[in-house]
Amino acid sequence: MKLSNFDIPAFVQDHWQKKPLMIPNPWEAWRNPLSADELAGLACEEEVESRLVTSGAEGRETGWALEHGPIPEQRFSTLGESDWTLLVQAVDQYVPEVAALIEPFRFIPDWRIDDIMVSYAADGGGVGPHFDQYDVFLIQGAGQRRWQIGQACDEETLLLPHDDLRLLAEFEPQEEWICGPGDILYLPPGIAHNGTAVGDDCLTYSIGFRAPSTSELIGYWSDDMLADLVKDARFADPDLMLQENPGEIRAEALDRMHEMIRSRFDDRDAFRRWFGQYGSIPKYAEHVDAPNTEQSETDIAARLDAGSRLFRNPSSRFLFVRKGDNSLTLFANGHSHDCSGARARFAEQLCAVPAGQGTIEPGPDENILSLVTALVNQGSLVFWDDQD
Ligand code: SIN
Ligand code: CO
């Protein structure tokens, strides 16, 4: 599906990470890709992350309540006609037509995109006033939802005491829209919002983003760095200067130790490799399984010759970083692969495959075949006929 009435450069300049924007149905022809029943079906499955939030009439005695999935099928028949919402995470990994909704938003790089959460709400249902730490495009799939937009929030913003939900203690709506099928609301991080279903069959798709925090970058990079640290230098002071007060830590000693750390963190090449791997780790790594038996290049070539088709595992993440005009490193599911020439061009095509359509056509080049073999053996590429 395409956006026909959406000015991307203007959006990036004026709204992305800056201020909310209500985009009245900009699609060439909006078609809701998922039914409420299909969503409920996903929520019953063990490996799918889902939540049920009840409020109002449903949860009035207790206020807001959260139940984690998998949701037992019979639970749906006990829910009333209003004031509940079902939320299912990463639906793009299970339904290619939902994954296809990401395609028009790939003007934002893939490494920034997290997943598509889908919510279904009965009349009056919603998750309550809250803020998110990430940007989000909220696409109204079916039915109607009232969106109220409020103040800018941060870590200091007061929340209601609740064990499971991060609801705002104070919500000051400043703007309000009713979104219908195809309408999109963009929200930058930290803006208070409250979405409430107006009538039944309210289906909303949230395209969520990733943005690493300083603590995440330092924490995860240091963990990986420590795991690989083979040559562990130790502080040394053969040029020891005599000092008056034995209690003093002298600036020279501090500088030397600070440099021991800085030299590691200053290694741009190591950071490039680490971040590519880290950024390509899938949301659910357990969904990317290696095949039962290791495949050789000859096996793969034979299967391709016999007409077997390869596709990108929908749970995998493909990214690349350029190293020069003709070479790059491809990252997939936390693994890195150096590529140049035809293999690099193939890696670029692999990364640009349209969201939701994973079919891959590797050429006969041997360097490409060795890359494809590695990607099949790590579970990033899958043969159609191996699907379970
Ligand atoms: C929803 O779809 O109900 C919640 C989305 C959000 O407010 O983040
Ligand atoms: Co939100």
Image: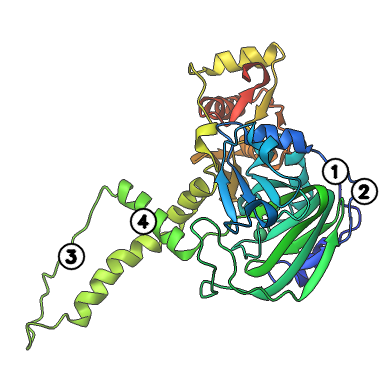
Residue 267 in the image: x percent, y percent? 41, 59
Cα distance in 3D space between marks 2 and 1: 7 Å
Q: Name the residue under label 1.
A: 1
Instruction: Report helix, strand or loop for mark 1.
Output: loop
Q: Name the residue under label 4.
A: 222
Q: Are marks 2 and 4 in contact (CB under 8 Å)?
A: no
How many marks the image carries: the answer is 4
Is label 3 within 8 A of ligand 2 (CB to nearest ligand atom)?
no
Residue 205 in the image: x percent, y percent? 74, 49
Among numbered discs 2 and 4, the one appearing first in the sequence: 2
Q: Are marks 3 and 4 in contact (CB under 8 Å)?
A: no
- In this picture, residue 250 sits left or right of residue 327: left
Displayed-image quarter of ligand 1: bottom right
Q: Mark 2 points at which residue?
A: 28
Q: Which of 197 and 95 is in front in this view?
A: 197
State the quadrant of the C terminus: top right
Q: How crowded is mark 3: few (under 14 residues within 10 Å), some or many (20 or more)?
A: few
Give the number of the mark in front: 1 or 3: 1
Give, as a three-letter code, the residue at label 2: Glu
Cα distance in 3D space between marks 3 and 4: 19 Å
Instruction: Report helix, strand or loop for mark 2.
Output: loop
Q: Name the residue under label 3.
A: 235
Using the image, determine if residue 64 lies above or below residue 67: below
